[in-house]
Image (cartoon, grey):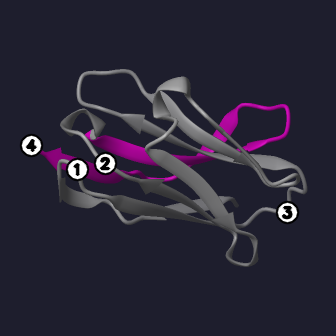
Amino acid sequence: QVQLVESGGGLVQAGGSLSLSCAASGHSFSDFYMGWFRQAPGKEREFVAGYRWIDDSAYYADSMTGRFTISRDNAKNTLYLRMANLKPEDTAVYYCALAMSGGPYDYWGQGTQVTVSS
């Protein structure tokens, strides 16, 4: 079964940086996407960034460009999210997800808490 395990969350001061990791296992999809989402308290979950594994392409929500960088390590089946110049409004639980090409994000990690203090 597909497993996604996030790590790297924590507490950081505003203006600081943090990197998240998501290790994927248990699938043999050849064309799939992995993405990062976040959910702040009292808010809907929102898309942050995604990565298409087969063609090494990255894409971002409009509001996330510039401070967030998504990348991968193909050999480790691991997705990363580098977050810079963090703001208190970036405080949220960050989730990693996986989707087969053309499908919804069906597989989700447990989430990792990111807290940005002012």
Image quadrant assignment for residue 91: top left
The quarter of the picture where the C terminus appears is top left
Let me know if residue 94 is in the magenta part. yes
The amino acid type of the residue labelled 2 equals: Asn
Image quadrant assignment for residue 56: bottom right
Picture layout, residue 13 above or below residue 92: below
Q: In the rendered structure, which disc, 3 or 4, sits on the residue that comes first in sequence?
A: 3
Q: In the rendered structure, which disc, 2 or 4, sits on the residue that comes first in sequence?
A: 2
Picture layout, residue 21 above or below residue 84: below
State the image coordinates of residue 96 (x, y, percent, origin top left).
53, 50
Q: In the rendered structure, which disc, 1 or 3, sits on the residue that comes first in sequence?
A: 1
Q: Which residue is mark 1?
A: 15
Q: Which residue is mark 3?
A: 28
Q: Which residue is mark 2?
A: 85
Q: CA distance from mark 4 to mark 1?
A: 9 Å
Q: Is residue 82 found left or right of 102 in the rendered image? A: left
Q: CA distance from mark 1 to mark 3?
A: 39 Å
> Which stretch is magenta?
91-117
The amino acid type of the residue labelled 1 equals: Gly
Label of residue 62 in the image: none
The amino acid type of the residue labelled 4 equals: Ser
Q: Give the dominant element type of the magenta stretch: helix, strand or loop.
A: strand
Let me know if residue 10 is in the magenta part. no
Which residue occupies 85% across, 39% down? 101
Q: Are marks 2 and 3 in contact (CB under 8 Å)?
A: no
Q: Which residue is mark 4?
A: 118
Q: Determine whether the residue tagged by mark 1 lies in a helix, strand or loop.
A: loop
